[in-house]
Image (cartoon, coloured by chain):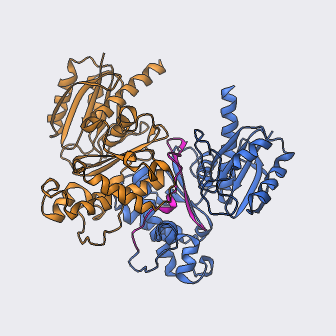
Chain colours: A blue, B orange
Amino acid sequence: MSIGAIEAGGTKFICGIGNDNGEIEDQISFPTEHPEQTLPKVIQYFQDKQVEAIGIGSFGPIDIRPDRKTYGYVTTTPKPGWGNYDMLGILKREFSVPFGWDTDVNAAAFGEAKWGAAQGLSSCLYYTVGTGVGVGVYSEGKLVHGLVHPEGGHVLTRRHPDDVFSGVCPYHGDCLEGMAAGPAIEARWGKKGHELPRDHSAWEMEAFYIAQSITGAILLNSPEKIILGGGVMQQSQLFPLIRKAVLENLNGYVSSSVILDHIDDYIVPPGLGQQAGLCGALALGLTARDHQISAL
Amino acid sequence: MSIGAIEAGGTKFICGIGNDNGEIEDQISFPTEHPEQTLPKVIQYFQDKQVEAIGIGSFGPIDIRPDRKTYGYVTTTPKPGWGNYDMLGILKREFSVPFGWDTDVNAAAFGEAKWGAAQGLSSCLYYTVGTGVGVGVYSEGKLVHGLVHPEGGHVLTRRHPDDVFSGVCPYHGDCLEGMAAGPAIEARWGKKGHELPRDHSAWEMEAFYIAQSITGAILLNSPEKIILGGGVMQQSQLFPLIRKAVLENLNGYVSSSVILDHIDDYIVPPGLGQQAGLCGALALGLTARDHQISAL
């Protein structure tokens, strides 16, 4: 029997089934519309799949604390229909199997730790830089939840000396997301990222902001691997720029050869490529199944 | 029988014994000199104490990964005699009991989670702001180690608009420690912190930097409690300034009533007061004892 996986993104949903080895055996994708359009498609996909468990990595903010009444809800999103929406509850009423439930970026971090770039490690951070910026945190062998869940895309930034752009985050203006997500690039340069040449100064500036937040995260959490995914990170010229800026920022302070001598293996693209999110949801489903088995 | 506790600070060592309830039954303190002077005093103190286990919270950087050859060492400190020094090994040769070993700030975070301000929670951050700035990270019921260990005192900061001070960190100049530790206050204002009036503008600026790093840490890790200790935090007028600045920085983005409605209970002084570090070392010792018992 298979495990179900749902990557519930703000732009599109991906549903799939996979196995214990992290292999996706089938998948479909459709745009994220109003939940009354979207959830029936999810339910229909899994209707005849006979899955043992389902894992969901969802856009947020979501409630991932089982001790709260709104556990399983998408909470304060402005996305029409999704605010205060009981996504997990709706699906649980349809399928009486164990469910795993976490943020999309925590799921991706978990997938990468299980089968990807952080395999065998007990900590990693997964950044997605795209329409927004999100950060999944995996630490000491556990996904970090805490009070709400990590929201590391909104950390405050120090301004690049050549940057006069005010930022696009409606909450913070010039936080990381406000300065470095896709919409910020487009607003600052008048073009989408993929329309800018690879040697445009936009990329050094982009790397500056991303590297700054990574530096802070290295200092605070000391992760064993930093994984950078999302649409903006398809610009592969960013990786060497980010690595260089991180080393400059740290200035030798964190004296680990993993960082100082092997930065190319420390700050990396997802080992699972575009499947990091869906594989992560699969991993959440597997864990939910195994917890139920061990509780029997 | 009792548990031994060692708070190995850069300025002074505190050794004590305590019990399962977190009560310290006896303690002594002496200045941190060359290890050849200091360690014999530690050994002498515990010689006749018949402890079941010993926990150590140490100044750093230290090696806390058991899979490394230098596990138990103080590593790259410039402090004379302590660089690349096998503190844990020396003590293990004297006392054949289980040892707990972590950073001073992780120990304090652990003590606060067990008996202090974060009791019953599964996550907290412990900041010490004094001669330096350190951050202990407790997350999902575990102390965070990762690649090296947290070094959150060195996160980069955004400049206060009225601040032209260049910072005193030898690695980063104007990182958090460079801008907000005791020596930075003294260098910027020409007076020690305790010599400045409580309504001096120094405190608003100090709160600005501390709040900024706390905001980043809330966004990245979503801790359930933030505990602020250390000499500089004896200036209690800082707490309301920091809380206000954190709320302004977040601007409602993390919508949890724990933060938005109860910030006075969210950002707090240590519940264990000045004993947070020693109680934390005691907690490390207890955990080491219990691990050994469960392994038998």
- Residue extending farthest to the bottom is A190
Q: Position of residue B197 (x, y in %)?
A: 15, 58
The residue lying furthest to the right in this view is: A48
Residue drawn at (47%, 37%), measured in percent from left and top? B141
- Front residue of B260 and A224: B260
**Residue A85 at x, y percent in the picture:** 68, 53
Viewer-closest of B187 and A37: A37
Q: Residue at x 36, y 62 (%)?
A: B156
Left or right of A194? Residue B206 is left
Up-down relation of residue A11 to residue B229 (above or below): below
Vertical arrangement, residue A112 with respect to residue A95, above or below: below
Number of numbered discs on residues = 0
Asked whether residue B210 is in view, the answer is yes
- Residue extending farthest to the front is B261
**Eyeballing the image, is B286 above or below A97?**
above
Of residues B61 and B218, the one drawn nearer to the viewer in this rendering: B218
Res. A222 visible in picture: no
Q: Nearer the viewer, residue B144 or B257?
A: B257
For image coordinates 66% across by 51% down, the residue present is: A57
**Residue A202 within the magenta-colored segment of the rendering:** no
Magenta span: predominant SS is loop
Which residues are drawn in magenta?
A: A130-159
Please provide percent x and percent y for residue A271.
62, 55
Q: Is residue A146 magenta?
A: yes
Q: Considering the image in quadrants, where does the N terminus of chain B appear? A: top left
Taking B98 as reference, is A107 above or below it?
below
Q: What residue is at 45 percent from the left and 53 percent from the top?
A: B260
Percent position (x, y) of residue A291? 65, 33
